[in-house]
Amino acid sequence: MTTSHRLIVFPAIDLKNGQVVRLAEGDMDRATVYGDDPAHQARLFADAGAQHLHVVDLDGAFAGESVNGEAVRRIVADFPGHVQLGGGIRNRDSVERWFDLGVSRIVIGTAALDDPDFVRGVARDYPGGIVVAVDAKDGMVATKGWADVSTTSVTDLARRFEDAGVAALLFTDVGRDGLLKGANIEATVDLARAVSIPVIASGGVKGIDDIHMLALHAKDGIEGVITGRALYDGRLDLAAALSVAAAA
């Protein structure tokens, strides 16, 4: 469980063709472009008070290897806080390269299901540096950019890494992601209570109420929340979200 009981707010920068985008339900054909300068967006988030950033190489998630590497490098160079990166990172060379370039934490999704020994190995070698993405469609784990749905339940996958030394689980309700339906707080809290690993909430955040509710459950093991579209659409003010998260 988390010890500080203070919720971390992670503004999200999703990268597609070098641009800042948001998808609806993980569908690459339903992308909204919010800018063509990801590093500038990172600086704006820092100016608003963000100390953590969540970056996803969407093209990489489908390709299985880094595609938007140059954009990520610029973000890491320009953002003064901690950068958490996911998307197509499925081998040790990729993990080592990103840590060497200054990324603080690596998010591993597909490989967590396909190659758990790989995840255990890098979690052991990089203490506090590995986050396992647990993406859910109707309670089952979705992989490969959410294009495939497995027969493994979210809780079962999470419990496989109880003793692996991973820093956190990133739980996304795919059916809500990018749709502003509100975070699936019940499912997120249930997962946090079921495992001893801190959980990061993702998918569907629509406003300050979601931040407040998740902050109230920080004591249950919810470490943070990722928000993207609500920030870009102006439904959520980042400075206000950070204030609510810190005050809970």
Image: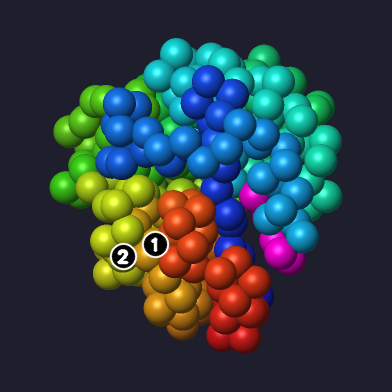
> Label 2 sits on what residue type?
Gly
Residue drawn 76% across the image and 30% down it: 74
Examine the image and state in which quarter residue 23 appears: top left
The residue at which mark 1 appears reads as 205
Residue 130 image position (x, y, % from top left): 60, 40
- Above or below residue 94? Residue 191 is below
Which residue is under mark 2? 182
Q: Measured from the top left, where is residue 137 in percent x and y? A: 21, 43
Can residue 118 be seen from the camera position used here? no
What is the crowding at mark 2: few (fewer than 14 residues within 10 Å), some, or many (at least 20)? some
Q: Position of residue 6 (x, y in %)?
A: 61, 75
For the point 72% across and 42% down, the residue is 40
* Quadrant for the C terminus in the image: bottom right
**Element marked by disc 2:** loop
Q: Residues within 10 Å of mark 1 (few under 14, many from 20)?
A: many
Please tell me whether residue 177 is drawn above or below residue 149 in the rendered image. below
The amino acid pointed to by label 1 is Val
Label 1: which secondary element: loop
Residue in the foreground of this view, choosing between 111 and 78:
78
Task: Give the residue drawn at x 62%, y 86%.
Answer: 247
Q: In the rendered view, would you say 121 is above or below 123?
A: above
User: Are the residues tagged 1 and 2 within 8 Å (C-beta)?
Assistant: yes
**What segment is highlighted magenta in the picture?**
48-53
Say which residue appears at 67% left-offset and 45% top-offset.
41
Gap in angstroms between the C-alphas marked 1 and 2: 5 Å
